[in-house]
Every structure is written in C-alpha cells, then in structure tokens.
Amino acid sequence: MKTSDLIKKFPEEKDLVTHSRPYFNHSIEFKNIFTPRERADMLDIAGLNMFFFPSEMITGCDLLSDSGTTSMTNEQWAALHLRDEAYGSNRGYFLVMKQIIETFGEEFFNDPNSGRPNAFIFHQGRPAEDALFTMVGRLGSGLIIPGNGHFDTTQANIKRNNMQAVNLFSPELMDESSGYHFKGDMDLIKFKSLLERSHNKIPLSYLTITNNTGGGQPVSMENIRDVSNVSNHYDIPLFFDACRFAENAWFIQQHEPGYGNKDIKTIVKEMFSYVDGFTISFKKDGLVNMGGGLFLKDNGLFMKKYPDIPDAIMGHQIDKEGHPTYGGLSGRDIMTLAVGLKIATKEEYLTYRINQVKDFGENLKNHGLPVMAPIGGHAVYLDMNKFFADTAIKPEDFGGVAFTAVLLAAYGHRTIELGNFSFGSYDKKTKKEILPEFNFVRFAIPRLRYEKKDLDSVAEAVKILYENRDKIPPVNVTYGRDLPMRHFKARFEFRKYSI
Ligand SMILES: Cc1ncc(COP(=O)(O)O)c(C=O)c1O
C-alpha cells in the first residue's frame, strides 16, 4: 500500500486544532531574573514611566511596542553580514529599490539617474513624516490634514508645521454590536462634508493602515477606493501611513468580499494603486529593527500638483539624514530591510502572526476582560473605562497608567497606556484635562518573538489584576503633565489610596 493512500484513513492535518509555528527558533536569549520587589523599586525610580524602565529587568513579556522589536530571520542576519558600508550607492540600496518596486509598484521608486527623485529612505517613520509635512506646511496657512486616525508622531509633525490634524474615525469603531471587520475605515460622510467645506485648505489626505490609534483596526479596500475617489475629485492627493500594510492586506483577503482568492502581493499592489504617496516605518511590516521612508508615486497627483516638493525633500533629507542612497541607515540595516520586506507578505507568516494576536485577545476576552473587538493585527487593546467602570477611579486618575505599572512590577510584563494620559492634554487655563475619544492600554505583540506560553502568562496576570482592580490606586503626575507628547516624558507616583 502506498503511504499516500494510507494517510487518507486518518484525519487531515489541516483539521487538527493545533498547528506548529511556520518557523523555528534560530537563536535564543536567556532573560535575567529579577524579583517583583526589585522591579517595583526600579519602577519608582523611573517615575512609573514605562519608557524609562530598563528592558533587561523585564522578566515577562515586553509588549511596549511592535515597532523595531522583530526577531529577525536567519536570512536577515546573513544579509546583514553581506552589507556594504559605502558612503554612496551601497549594495543594499539597489536591493531595497528592487524590493520596493516588487512590493508596492514600480512607480514608487524611480531610477536615481532619471532626474525625478521620488523615493526617500529615512532612519524611521517620523523623520519621513517630518520631511513631508515640513514641505507641505509651506504651501499656505490654516491648512488641514484629514485622516482616519493620525498616529501621535504624525499628528505632532502636522502640528509642528502649523497645520491641523483632523481625525475622522469610523462611527463603527466603538460600536460593540457591530460585527464589521474594518473599523479602521475613515468616516466617509464626515470626510465628504469636510472636503465640501474646506477642500482648498487641504493639501493631502492621509489613511493609516492599519489604524494604530483606532484600536489597530484594518481599513477596507472599499474605503481606500472611496477615500481616493473623493479626495481626487477635489484634486487632493491621498497618502498612506503604511507601517502595517501587509497585515492590513491580510484582513482584506480574509474578510472583504471579492478578495478571498487573491494573494497578499496582489492585494498590496491594488491598495497602493489608489494612493499618490506614502510614509512608512519599516520597523513594523518591514520586519527590521530600524528604517523608514517616504515614497511618491511617479506621475501621481502629488508630484504633478507640487512639482518642486520632491527636490526640496531631497535637500531636507541630505541636511538631516544623509545622501538619498542611504538616508540615515547603515548598509547593514538596508540589507536586512531588503530581506524583511520580502518576508512580510508571506501568507503563512501573516496567518500565524495575526492569529497569534487574535488567540491572545480571545484568551483575555474569555477571562471576562473588556477587549476591543474585533481584535486588530498587531496588538490587543483593553478598554480602561470599562476595566475601572465599577471602581472609584476617575478619568483624571489615569487608571491605565496605574494598571501598566502594577502589571510590570507585580508580574513582569510591560505594556503601554494609550488613552487619557497619552492622547489627552492638560488645559493650563481651565486647569482641566482634555480627554481623548478612547482610553486604552495596548498590548503590542512583537513579530516572531513570543510563543503561546508567554502570552498565556500575560493573560493570566491581567485576569488577576482585573479581579483585584479595586486595589489599583490612582496616580499623581509628578512631572510633565502639560508637556507635548507627555507620555514619553512624564513621571508619576501612586496616590495613597484606601479601599
Ligand atoms: C501608525 C504609525 N505611524 C508612524 C509611526 C512612527 O514610526 P517610527 O517609530 O519609525 O518613527 C508609528 C510608530 O509606532 C506608527 O505606529
């Protein structure tokens, strides 16, 4: 009997409940062991600010960010050694050029000798945003940049250049009864009405895929197409903040009618066919620890409308980062990016990655925790208003900050508050807090780094904190309450609290 006939008598592999990962460990790193007491003392020294806590003391999972925290593959480590650290036109630059063309389309990377520069490498996402908005900000006064939910650095770069960042979150975003899969969409009705009123004040529109500020939710192809049509109708270019483009494409493939049979690469190409440019931090779906870029579509609306800007961007890039052929990155960083971008659209990688995030979120949900649903591609968001709803914690007590500090000190897991403190601000005149639309703690899952057991241990710790939520005290802000981007800088202490 042939073995292939024999195995037909057994349940099929695909029908098994558990599957092994589509990769295995290449090398591992042992953690240092620190006691809860040692972590707690250190946290007091760091003023309960997650960013100032030494990562080497994290004995659990570090879910502070999925940005730049990827475990690289063996191919990336090998590519790193093949680096060329030349001052101009290093080997990796040409490989990245080839890969950008392959992933996003040839119109996003012109031959450097063509005289039409349109591809700008930066060391992160935010200097790319800085370059774009510095140039766009010079186009006039009172300008507005509408988006589906600007990331904090994007918003800061828009404001720094005297423009207004307007967030048009989808009305579905906080609607729990909605089973809609694309809650990251732009609110099309509000977008149309804004453009009707103020189109002459809008130099470009911006879609963040996936919507990190809006619960990490994906944006549908239909919304991308509609936003592009409306924008272009008013002669306004559309840009992506494309950090998590591959994860967004996976959601389109899984949940949007008409895309189930299309592969990720085809979906990505279609997504980018609707935009005139994009900024990107490669530290997410580029699967690298450092890198970013700004890419303009050749003959796209942006390049046609603002023909002087590409050259001005190149000047800015040279002043701030270096020659366009390395743009603030070492040759070895560029080599790892050329390989990382290729892996990012692999179907088996994306399926495993996004399901890992989903399984972790469902685990929390099964423990009764108020998790934002559906679960997004890179992180799980816990609604702190609901978490503390039946306790004495008020919005200005920054319960989310307190929660992250107790979780780290007691159980060794690092997360981040993205809510009343991070996205709120302090009005010095009224001496009152201005609260944002959402109040989350985010558990961002680094790519290719943790196993199920790691995330199970986080879920158990969070469950225990939920059961003991009335023991989590408010925090006082001891420094930085009125600073811009205050969550990166502020310090806190626990308030004396009796229950
Ligand atoms: C949606 C989004 N845009 C922009 C950025 C900025 O990228 P970078 O951290 O590389 O400057 C981030 C970083 O987390 C992000 O999530």
Image (cartoon, rainbow, N blue to C red):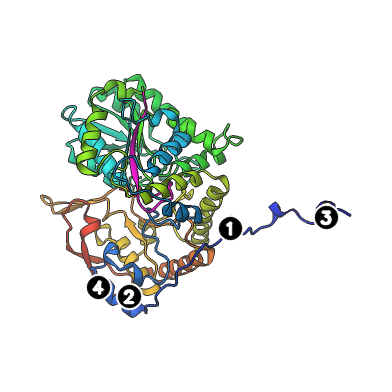
Q: Which of 267 and 185 lies nearest the eye of the viewer?
A: 267
* Mark 3 or mark 1: whose residue is earlier in sequence: 3
- The location of residue 229, given as percent across then percent down, is 40, 23
Residue position for label 3: 3
Quadrant of residue 467 within the rendered picture: bottom left
Residue position for label 4: 44
Residue 39 - label: 2
Which secondary structure, mark 1? loop
The dominant secondary structure in magenta is loop
Residue type marked 4: Asp
Viewer-side label of 2, 3: 3
Residue type marked 3: Thr
Which secondary structure, mark 4? helix
Which secondary structure, mark 3? helix
Residue lying at 22% horizontally and 66% vertically, measured from the top left: 492
Viewer-side label of 3, 4: 3
What residue range appears in magenta?
A: 283-298
Disc 3 crowd rating (10 Å Cα; few below 14, some 14-19, many 20+) is few
For the residues labelled 3 and 1, say whether their Cβ atoms are less than 8 Å apart: no
Residue 21 - label: 1
Residue type marked 1: Arg
* Mark 4 or mark 1: whose residue is earlier in sequence: 1
